[in-house]
Image (tube, helix red, strand yellow):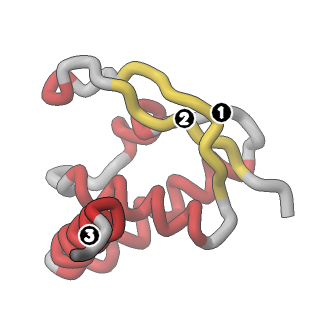
């Protein structure tokens, strides 16, 4: 029997990959640039801060996937949680990030 945590991560990553592959590469690049710019400030930030600048209609799985990608690349690190300001999320907690000095 496979570890449920491992299987959950595999399914999460597969879903993110499908969403990202279905997204215009220019939108993916725009999200990556927004994250990099926020990280470069050294200030804490979350998706709340980037939302007004995100490409219109981009799925949340893509946005979350790009944050995860930036984390794996060592661009950002998690520092806590804040309340989401997106009305569709019903004020659930979302990660707060900070850029990693290089």
Number of the front mark, 1 or 3: 3
Task: Place residue 45 in its image quadrant.
Answer: top right
Q: Are marks 1 and 2 in contact (CB under 8 Å)?
A: yes
Task: Tell me the number on the disc at residue 44.
Answer: 1
Label 3 sits on residue = 7
Mark 1 Cα shell of 10 Å, populated few (<14), some (14-19), many (≥20): some
Figure quadrant of the N terminus? bottom left
From this view, report whether residue 29 is shown above or below residue 35: below
Q: CA distance from mark 1 to mark 3?
A: 31 Å
Please report the residue visible at 42 percent of the width from the left and 63 percent of the height from the top.
66
Task: Place residue 74 in its image quadrant.
Answer: bottom right
Tell me where residue 6 appears, x and y as whole percent.
34, 69
Label 2 sits on residue = 96
Figure quadrant of the C terminus? bottom right
Q: CA distance from mark 1 to mark 2?
A: 6 Å
Given residues 12 and 62, the one toward you in this image is 12
Given residues 34 and 13, the one toward you in this image is 13
Number of the front mark, 3 or 2: 3
From this view, report whether residue 102 is shown above or below residue 57: below
Tell me where residue 67 appears, x and y as whole percent.
46, 56
Mark 1 vs mark 3: which is more N-terminal? Answer: 3
Is there any visible trace of residue 20 in the rendered image? no
Given residues 6 and 87, the one toward you in this image is 6
Please report the residue visible at 27 percent of the width from the left and 18 percent of the height from the top.
91
Mark 1 vs mark 2: which is more N-terminal? Answer: 1
Please report the residue visible at 35 percent of the width from the left and 38 percent of the height from the top.
51
Q: CA distance from mark 3 to mark 2?
A: 25 Å
Number of the front mark, 1 or 2: 2
């Amino acid at each position: 029997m496979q570890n449920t945590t491992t299987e959950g991560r595999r399914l999460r990553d597969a879903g993110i990959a499908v969403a990202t592959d279905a997204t215009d590469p220019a939108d993916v690049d725009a999200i990556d640039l927004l994250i990099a710019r926020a990280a470069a400030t050294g200030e804490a930030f979350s998706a709340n801060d980037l939302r007004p600048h995100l490409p219109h209609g981009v799925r949340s799985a893509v946005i979350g996937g790009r944050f995860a990608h930036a984390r794996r690349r060592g661009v950002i690190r998690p520092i806590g949680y804040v309340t989401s300001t997106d009305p569709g999320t019903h004020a659930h907690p979302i990660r707060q990030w900070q850029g990693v000095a290089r």
